[in-house]
Image (tube, rainbow, N blue to C red):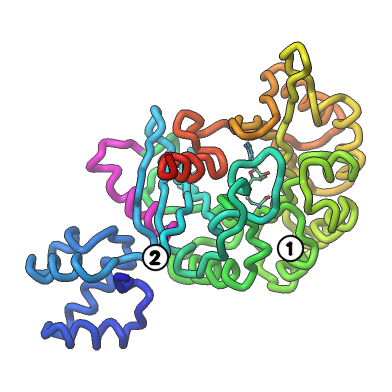
Amino acid sequence: MKQVLFNFTDKELEDFIINFGQPKFRAKQIKEWLNRGAPNFSVMKNLPETLRNQLNDICETLPVKIIKKLVSSDNQTTKFLLELFDGEQIECVLMRTTYGNSICVSSQAGCAMGCKFCASTLLGLKRNLTINEMFAQVLTAQWELRQDVFNNIKPNGDSNNNDVSHIVVMGTGEPLQNTQNVFGFLEKANHDLNISWRRITVSTCGIVPGIKELTNWGRPINLAISLHAPTDELRSQIMPINNKYKIHEMMDAAFEFSQTHNRQLMIEYILLGKKNENGETVIYNATEEHANKLSDLIQKHNVMVNLIPWNSVDERDFASLSGNAIHKFQDILINKGIHTRIRRERGADIGSACGQLRLKNKKEQSE
Ligand code: SAH
């Protein structure tokens, strides 16, 4: 197995370089490249070529290796399929938006949560990601952004920089099942990359003890709750976690978090349909009654509801709703004074939704 230099301490890196018969200052040069997210040693142009080749043979730079890179037709979304040291694969997505550059980070390889609409959980949970495996996803995006000038990708709208500015822990996995590493990763991102707490969002399916840990951790980040259904009966049908933590208990913990930090709570709500016997799509969780119940749950609180069009997953027995149905649902919420927006589908053309790329690649490998 190749050694990963990003995982070395400064001292370890220095010793390694000296053992290589190289002067000590090379360690510092390499460290700078690593911190910029260099994907291999060939790009380290201030090192002698023989050293670059030797290092490529026996080491990796980062603990994640790019297996596939997909760019959306508008060039604004880049999705990476990454391989870890043990062969596990994860995904992360870079989104260039008008407010900045946001990266969606995976917190686990696979997922144990079993949500019925999601692709990430289909193969179960493999393991938690380490601090460096999460941090290296951000560095990979950061490196990509720095290449934009060479690739002729212009900054989007008003945003005029090529730094990662926002982190959303909304990729594969349940971050609140891996709290210590997620907190460690976010501390590092805040400290080393200067990403402010307010530009960080953690999304959970509702692990109540984890939400409490988040509150105790005390950092004023944003919390997103994957609600997706307004009653326990319906939610338990699509999200097994609801059998353990009921909606009210989860929402109380979430409100407590957002009140502690005076932050707006984000509610994620996927709009799901189902096919009936005639092959027509019928609404599953987005009728007027559902909208009313949803508004009862959150009224009087500082909440934003993010309505998410379902990205279809072949293995899953749901259907996407029409734009009309989504807007109708949104209108009911707006009339009740609820702050809502419809999530723009980014990179739908590159399978940017939740674990699809990893799943597809696994299937291809086993064929
Ligand atoms: N486990 C965490 C974070 C990962 S999932 C959580 O549940 O919040 C990130 C978000 O994507 C969640 O809101 C999840 O419900 C949603 N999601 C999963 N599959 C989806 C799909 N096929 N289409 C749209 N959103 C999906």
Determine whether the beta carbon of the residue marked 1 sits less than 8 angstroms from the nearest atom of ligand 1: no
Residue positioned most to the top: 278
* Residue 140 image position (x, y, % from top left): 37, 55
* Above-or-below relation of 332 to 157: above
Q: Nearer the viewer, residue 165 or 11?
A: 11
- Magenta span of residues: 136-154
Query: Which amino acid type is shown beneath numbered disc 2?
Result: Phe
Task: Please give the name of the residue rendered at 59% of the width and 31% of the height, measured from the top-left corner.
Answer: 314
Q: Is residue 143 magenta?
A: yes
Task: Please give the name of the residue rendered at 57% of the width and 65% of the height, measured from the top-left corner.
Answer: 128
* Residue 29 image position (x, y, % from top left): 21, 73
Q: Would you say 97 lies left or right of 320 here?
A: left
Report helix, strand or loop for mark 2.
loop
Q: Would you say 115 lies left or right of 352 here?
A: right
Residue on which disc 2 sits: 85
Task: Please give the name of the residue rendered at 72% of the width and 31% of the height, measured from the top-left corner.
Answer: 271
Query: Which amino acid type is shown beneath numbered disc 1?
Result: His
Magenta span: chief secondary structure: helix
Report helix, strand or loop for mark 1.
helix
Q: Would you say 134 lies left or right of 56 here?
A: right
Quadrant containing ligand 1 reads top right
Q: Nearer the viewer, residue 312 or 169?
A: 312
* Above-or-below relation of 305 to 10: above
| Mark 1 or mark 2, earlier in chain | 2
Identify the mark at residue 261; answer none if there is no mark: 1
Quadrant location, the N terminus: bottom left
Q: Callout 1 environment at 10 Å: few (<14), some (14 to 19), or many (20+)? A: some
Write down the quadrant of residue 335 in the picture.
top right
* Residue 66 image position (x, y, % from top left): 35, 52
Residue 201 appears in the rendering: no
